[in-house]
Amino acid sequence: MNEFYKISLGERIFRIINYILIVLLCLSIILPFLNIFALAFNPGKDAERGGIFFWPRIWSFENFMKVFEASNIASAFGISIFRTVVGTVSSVFLTAMAAYALKSKTLPGGKFFMMLIFFTMLFGGGIIPYYMLLKSIHLTNNIWVYVIPSLYSAWNLIIIRTFFQQIHPSLEESARIDGYNDFAIFMRIIMPLSRPVIAVIGLFNAVGHWNDWFTGAFFVRKASLRPLSTLLQEMLTSAEAMRDTLNQAAGTTKYELLDKIQITGNSLKMATIIVVVAPIIIIYPFVQRYFAKGIMIGSMKE
């Protein structure tokens, strides 16, 4: 605090404005989540009255019971966990291997390959050709449709390659003198020094796999192979359809049906958000320490 008063008036005003902006930014992120939390743990029928902002008026787990009463919820969780773990690990490892090869200035045709990889970021074939491709290689209605098509990402490859290029070449030269081959250098030198970028890309991959509902909805017909996000999306669609049907009803029947409903489409949506987001929030603190690039400091002494 004493240091605050030692700086100039202009610097104090600048810091105060920065602190205010940071606090406002944090509130803009935290308050919507608190509202989602309150609505998720409040009965839907009661929430329709309004007045619920950051705390439930009546604590209830009915919304979550509705989410978890689906008969195939356990298999959906298993599919989501499988695709997230296997898809993330395999994608990060194979993308890092490709980035390590492409970072070499002595690789024949390296610039040409990078141009081809960058070209894939500019154009796409569309949903119908993509579906036809997956069907031709027998990936539709197959659990590996969640893993194999997403093994490589051009954007992730470029990010990892750029990070690898910042590692001083003398580290690799020293390892080669000690008798290490390329794979040993990659596993024992490059990967340990690249934990920040690996953690970031891994988190992005995991979030993408966990939240992806599109693949299960359009490329998989077997209910037993649908992931959690797709299952919850179908539940939300059914809840909204039921609500629309009731709103179109007339006479006393409408109000009699509404009186029997405790869970609304909006309350189910909030519970679904909590179920989907909670695992990512739990995992994030374990990888955020790698986001700092400071692990490279002190690795070179020349």
Image (cartoon, helix red, strand yellow):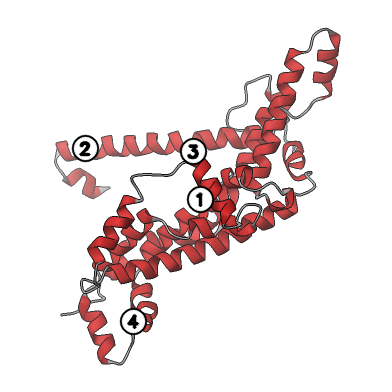
Amino acid of disc 3: Ile
User: Is the residue under label 4 in contact with that under label 2 (CB below 8 Å)?
Assistant: no
Q: CA distance from mark 2 to mark 4?
A: 50 Å
Q: CA distance from mark 4 to mark 3?
A: 46 Å
Q: Is residue 19 left or right of residue 233?
A: left
The residue carrying mark 4 is 182
Which image quadrant for residue 179? bottom left
User: Is the residue under label 3 in contact with that under label 2 (CB below 8 Å)?
Assistant: no
Nearer the viewer's eye, disc 1 or disc 3? 1
Instruction: Where is residue 143? Give x, y as percent.
Output: 64, 58
The residue carrying mark 2 is 14
Q: CA distance from mark 4 to mark 1?
A: 31 Å
Give the label on residue 208, or none. 1
Which quarter of the image is occupied by the C terminus?
Answer: bottom left
Q: Which of the pair 153/54 is nearer the observer?
A: 153
Instruction: Where is residue 250? Give x, y as percent.
Output: 80, 9
Q: Up-down: is 202 above or below 39? A: below
Instruction: Where is residue 235? Give x, y as percent.
Output: 70, 37
